[in-house]
Amino acid sequence: MSDSYDFSAIEPRWQQYWRERNLFHVDRREDREKFYYLDMYPYPSGELHMGHVRNYIIGDAFSRYRTMQGYNVLHPMGWDSLGLPTENAAIQFDIHPVEWTKQCVSNMKQQFDRLGISYDWEREVDTSDPDYYGWTQWIFLQLYSNGLAYRGPGLVNWCPDCQTVLANEQVVNGCCERCDATVERTTREQWFFKITDYSEKLLSDLDLLEDWPERVVKMQENWIGRSEGFSFRLKIREHDEDMEVFTTRIDTIYGVTFMVLAPENPLVERLTEGTDHEEAVRRYCQQAMAESVMERTSEDTEKTGIFTGAYAVHPLTGEDIPIWVANYVMMDYGTGAIMAVPAHDQRDFEFARKYEIPVVPVIQPEDEELDGETMTEAWEGDGRQINSGDFSGQPNRDALEQIADHLEVKGIGRRDVSYRLRDWCISRQRYWGAPIPIIYCDECGTVPVPEEDLPVELPRDAEFRTTGSSPLSQHEEFMNVKCPDCGGAARREPDTMDTFVYSAWYYLRYPSPREDEAPFNSRDVEYWLPVDQYVGGVEHATGHLMYSRFITKVLHDLGMVSFREPFASLFTQGMVYKDGAKMSKSRGNVVTPDGINEEYGADTGRLYSLFVGPPDQDTEWNDEGVVGAHRFLWRVWRLVNENLSIWNEDFSTTLPEDGSEAQRKMRRRTHRTIMKVTDDFEGMRFNTAIAAIMELSNELGSFVEQLNEDDAADRSVFSEGLRTLLMLLSPITPHICDELWERMGLEPSLFERDWPQADEKLAAAETITIVVQVNGRVRDSLDVPAGTEMDEVAEMALESEKVVKYVEGKEIAKIIKVPDRLVNVVVN
RNA sequence: GCCGGAGUGGCGGAACUGGCAGACGCACCAGACUCAAAAUCUGGCGGGGCUCAACACCCCGUGCGGGUUCGAAUCCCGCCUCCGGCACCA
């Protein structure tokens, strides 16, 4: 047997052992408590770097730990292969996405396996597999038939050169990432999921997510953006039209001096049609709409606008209010129109000053008299109503309620809630996605593809490289179809679905990945779900995680699942930096698992990834730190191999009853380490768990130095520590642990052994160091037997020379005693 | 602007509900082994003062300024810096 830690031989050997025994495969079994551990699946980019990998190692260490604790652990992995990132890569490397995906998946799978990650590959899910995306289309049809999927005009980023819609992340500084053309905001027919129907549920059920990071919950709260206010309609003079606005400050309604419409608001055209203003307003709107993409990235865009020539009627005073169009009102929030109160809204104020519109204060702050002519900024705080008809004189918060009541009684408006959340646009004018299962028939209109015709397969021979719109629209064979209703000639929807649609339900597929009668088998899903621990990057806080919650809620309301939230606990891992910057290929600062594997082995990479810092925080990768991790494994290696003659497999029968001081100290360390590591694993604090394991290892090293080989008790104490060390370390570095375990004559794999139990009595300290302070300053310390009365300790403290020095000649005011901790003598 | 998070040695980072700041590791320094080096092992390692030197002892020190407390990295108030999210949201 080699004495050298030859990781390059050891690691493949154990990986094969695990594979042959099919160790990582799990089935539903009612006799064990289940645990569903899920990592966010990656898109097949081809190569992983340590930044990504840390995430998966966290998951592996935790899954192995839970398995050793006796849970039935589901730990699956799959591929988010269908969608833009893959298509872009395929175009870049001029290879078909199917091929590209195949290559990347095979490469990444190998990388995972070389890291020794315990995935149950029998449950692998690949979203680009028609079996998978067919069920995604099926889910689309469920939403469609329940009124939750609709086609309608949507504001989109439009690249005039590429003739396609772009996702937000494809717009860089207001330009198309592919061709650099200036991106326009325009309106196009798109498919949407009506996530806004679930705004309230998505918001209020955040309360159920106790084990989610507070910041993710906050981000979702902000994203949903609930605000309470008042909606009302205003008549428009000389038009058979009215307009609706939403405001959170109905108390300021007497201060309205103009109305503003968003440039995209269709009302603009109707109000100006055939008037002197038509031409100028149209020109303005076009310009404003083109700007609006650029504007997003610039600091504070200058507010601009133009008068439409039309007037609204103030619902309380009957006065004429000019209607303007301005760039600072957004079409996709509220009603795309506002009542402007320049005296009490800073944006309206700036606009009014610029275009010389009157400013009328209606709320007077306590210590200041506002004058519309001279004020230099809006007063957005509270105060007393003025110029407000019958409501004048009241505190504005009271007036707000009264005015709302009054308008509701008069039938002019109602209390209302507005959300920032917008419907989810799922259309993509791209090739590499699941076709939206819809057919357009001249006779029957929009017809959903019948369920039995699913999946609508993506034709492999479509030209995906074109930059034009919807590559599938050019594929006649795909496009031409018989109408499922009337049998007449019809055309398919050429758009495909957004990547986030597939990932919104993949966690439901793992429990029954080959189910072909339904998207998932209910018994399996009800057994495994919800996910007990979900882990991924915080960048998915408002995208993927929101969409997944939405889809789960829809399925819940359709009676398909019993739970309302898919992920019981969420953990967001930090990013790994190198040389002060995020690891990325373009920066050339990536550290790959392959490189680490070759030089130090997978176990070293795993150990260092977890040791480098708290997993939920960003951290800096340090190549020299890797060496330290490797050195530690070497120390463990030698500790076992050099002491095999001392190791006693049946140590439990010869453990000392009481033992020498050194033996008691060693056992205390062993059992304390079990407690500490178990506690740290529960909180995913792997860095401190590893530190504790290192301390155990160091102490075993010292203990064995002075050990008497003829003393059975000594050998047992050492053996107990050694065995514990390997068990605690095995979820982190499973290869070396299984190897050493076997060399110790024990039966592998540690994956199948039980997590060690601490004996709290052995872990308890015998002597405790009590800190002695005088006036809060440390002056001495006392070692006393555990459980010594603090009064007694205090007396000892007062006798201490060092304390006497500081107390002498002074009056003792009081003595603070903290059990097992300290004594603080307070003197005047 | 609003909402989060974070500031601790040369570095990554420890410190459970306030109780010996700097665990563990890296780097560095010294010593052992060696012809020598590497590897390994042992010891040291926040700053300053006192001291020939060591031991001992004293003072300062967790972004800054206040406060609460016998006692603050930790709690409170007011700032600064960095990171992330949202952002003309009516």
Image (spheres, rainbow, N blue to C red):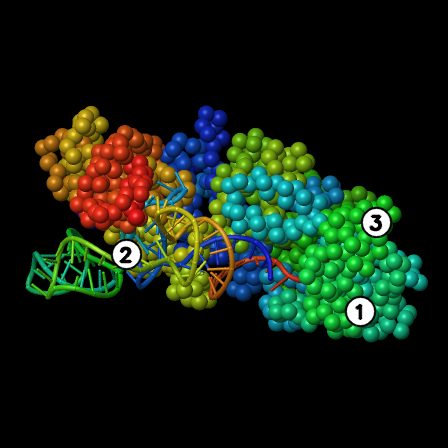
Name which residue lies at 22% across and 41% down.
A798
Mark 3, Cα crowd under 10 Å, few <14 / some 14-19 / many 20+, is some
Q: Is residue A202 visible?
A: yes
Compare residues A219 and A37 and report the one nearer the observer: A219
Q: Quadrant of residue A588?
A: bottom left
Same chain letter for marks 3 and 1: yes
Check disc 3 and give the amino acid type.
Leu
Q: Nearer the viewer, residue A198 or A130?
A: A198
Mark 2 falls within which chain? A
From the image, tell me which residue sits under label 1: A358
- 3 vs 2, front mark: 3
Q: Can residue A446 be seen?
A: no
Disc 2 crowd, CA 10 A, few/some/many (<14, 14-19, 20+)? some
Residue A420 % position (x, y): 68, 53
Pointer 3 residue: A407
Mark 2, residue position: A627
Q: Quadrant of residue A85?
A: bottom right
Disc 3 to disc 1: CB gap under 8 Å: no
Three-letter residue code for mark 1? Pro
From mark 3 to mark 2, how far is it between C-alphas? 73 Å
Q: Earlier in the sequence, mark 2 or mark 1?
A: 1
